[in-house]
Amino acid sequence: MHAAYGSMVAVTMRVRLESALSETGTTVTAFLEALVGEPIDAHQRRHGTVVAGTANLLGVEAGHLLVERSAVLQGRRSAQTFVNAETLLVPSRLPTAFCRRLWTSADPIGRIMAEEGIDFTRSRPWSPEGRRPTASDGFEAPDEYLLARTYLIEIDGSPVMEITEWFLPSLELFLRA
């Protein structure tokens, strides 16, 4: 966490955000929309294909085709950015309709999964330990953030996505209520 967030208020906000996220039984997209009171869209900064390395959390062989995506989640009306996210996903394990929407729409991953009726589980989140987005990742690294976490999304017991999220201080206003 950035040094500017060493105060008790920031810790309280981080704990409130972690608690709220752990209690929700829905997607991060739906959680954010309920929290901020407006639709959330994903504005892509980078979206492309890469090949898996030898060691990966997605359980695919080296050389397997993956999709790498960096996006910011913003309020549709306010254009306020709430989350920076990086996702590495296995398109061969996902429905074609999901992949098509991911490439062609501003819909966040959570909305696409919900609307396509994809049942999933989320692993227990962990800290990305110093991993922060950089300008080369497709967007500027946040100087400050309330919470950073990484987790896996699984469908039918197979990992399909590794997601890292940085929840931005713009959420503080909504967590105070």
Image: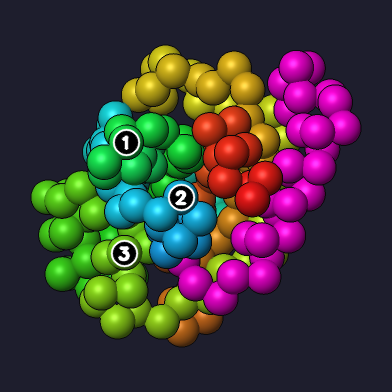
Residue 101: x %, y % from top left: 16, 59
Does the magenta-highlighted stretch encompass residue 171?
no
Q: Answer few, some or many: residues within 10 Å of disc 1's Cα (few below 14, many 20 plus, some between 14 and 19).
A: few
In this view, the residue in front, 91 or 164, is 164
Residue sitting at 67 percent across and 40 percent down?
147
Q: Answer few, some or many: residues within 10 Å of disc 3's Cα (few below 14, many 20 plus, some between 14 and 19).
A: some
Mark 1, secondary structure of its residue: loop
> Label 2 belongs to which residue?
36
Q: Quadrant of the N terminus?
A: top right
18 lies left or right of 144: right
Q: Closer to the observer: label 2 or label 3?
A: 2
Q: Amino acid at mark 2?
A: Val
> Label 1 belongs to which residue?
78
Dot label at residue 111? 3
Q: Which residues are magenta?
A: 1-28
52 lies left or right of 100: right
Residue sitting at 27 percent across and 36 percent down?
44
Residue 75: x %, y % from top left: 34, 42
How many labels were placed on the picture? 3
Query: CB of mark 2 within 8 Å of CB of mark 1?
Result: yes
Q: Amino acid at mark 3?
A: Arg
Q: Amino acid at mark 1?
A: Ser
Residue sitting at 20 percent across and 47 percent down?
106
Indicate which disc, 3 or 1, sits on the residue closer to the N terminus. 1
Residue 86 picture quarter: top left
